[in-house]
Image (cartoon, rainbow, N blue to C red):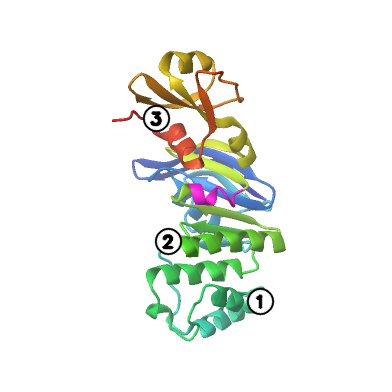
Amino acid sequence: MVRFQNITKNYGKNTALRDFSITIDRPGIYCLLGRNGAGKTTLLKTLAGHIAATSGTVTVNGKAVDMLAMPEEVYFVETGAAQFNIRLTSLFNAAANINPDFERDFALELGRRFHLDLKKRYKQLSFGMKAMVNTLIALSSGREILVLDEPVLGFDPVMRMVFYELLQECCAAKLRIVIVSTHIIDEIAKAAEQLIIVDKGQLKLYCGMDEVDEKAYSVTGPAEHVRAATEGLHVIGEIKAGGFISRYVYDQRIDAGDRCSVSSLGLQDFFIGLVGGDREAM
């Protein structure tokens, strides 16, 4: 179990996290979203014990986390992380020697599924392939909490699709908490079970993806009819085009009637509406 209790993190005069609290107490894939500078990476590094909070406490399975007590249960992969410049087979062997829980055969199988040349040295790989190797080592680590900061950065569309399939397979094979921070939003929606949105260093939303599927939708039609249909609902965004508007809603579903249409809202549009304010069509 992961628990953040009233975490604040200051960098000089700038506050990255402000009185942040959340409890993650069950296995699954957690999607972490936030705008640039919202505090996502600070949150993940605090969980891994790479940086210390200014105030508040972080615990993993009831044990306090700090830079002198990094949690053994957590494996953290950040964007741009590097590995020893050795052949990939040797790199997986080294990981197994360092970590007795490392699943070497599984790592090799994943490498083959991603068409990695296991005879190549780490520095001979492209940026995307380096990121893939880092992620494969994390998935094979045997740790119960995986923290992946922008893991698909540099992946092509096929690699991203296979990555999310593997993520789901790994979680099905062994129960664990996986927290994935990403800016490629709609793709993670297919794999994630829980959603965490951070905005300006504070928790904006924490819920199941099924709740977003049910309660996030758009109402489109003539402006007067849409406004009447959505009166009293939690409207998170609006797009205008002439006399027509689309309102983004996060609330109980409605039957908008004959003059308006109701459609499900993708995760990206939901996120933009929630943290980005209104948008108007040009």
Marks 1 and 3: in contact by CB < 8 Å?
Answer: no
Q: Which residue is mark 3?
A: 277
* Residue 180 located left or right of residue 282: right
Q: Pick the residue in front: 14 or 271.
A: 271
Residue 49 rendering spot, x and y as whole percentages: 53, 57
Q: Nearer the viewer, mark 3 or mark 1?
A: 3
**Helix, strand or loop status at disc 3:** loop
First to last magenta residue range: 186-192
Q: Is residue 190 magenta?
A: yes
Q: Nearer the viewer, mark 1 or mark 2?
A: 2
Callout 1: few (<14), some (14-19), or many (20+) C-alpha neighbours within 10 Å? few
**Helix, strand or loop status at disc 2:** loop
User: Please, what is the three-letter code of the amino acid marked with disc 3?
Assistant: Gly
The quadrant in which the C terminus is found is top left
Q: Residue furthest left?
A: 282
Q: Which mark is residue 79?
A: 2
* Residue 13 located left or right of residue 53: left
- Total marks shown come to 3
User: Please, what is the three-letter code of the amino acid marked with disc 1?
Assistant: Pro
Residue 201 rendering spot, x and y as whole percentages: 45, 39
Q: Which residue is mark 1?
A: 100
Compute the Cα span from label 3 to label 1: 48 Å
User: Please, what is the three-letter code of the amino acid marked with disc 2?
Assistant: Thr
Is residue 204 positioned above or below 155 on the image?
Answer: above
Compute the Cα span from label 1 to label 2: 25 Å
Compute the Cα span from label 2 to label 3: 28 Å
Callout 2: few (<14), some (14-19), or many (20+) C-alpha neighbours within 10 Å? some
Q: Pick the residue in front: 237 or 203.
A: 237
Is residue 271 positioned above or below 156 on the image?
Answer: above
Please report the residue visible at 48 percent of the width from the left and 59 percent of the height from the top: 50
Q: Earlier in the sequence, mark 2 or mark 3?
A: 2
Is residue 78 visible to the viewer in this orientation of the structure? no
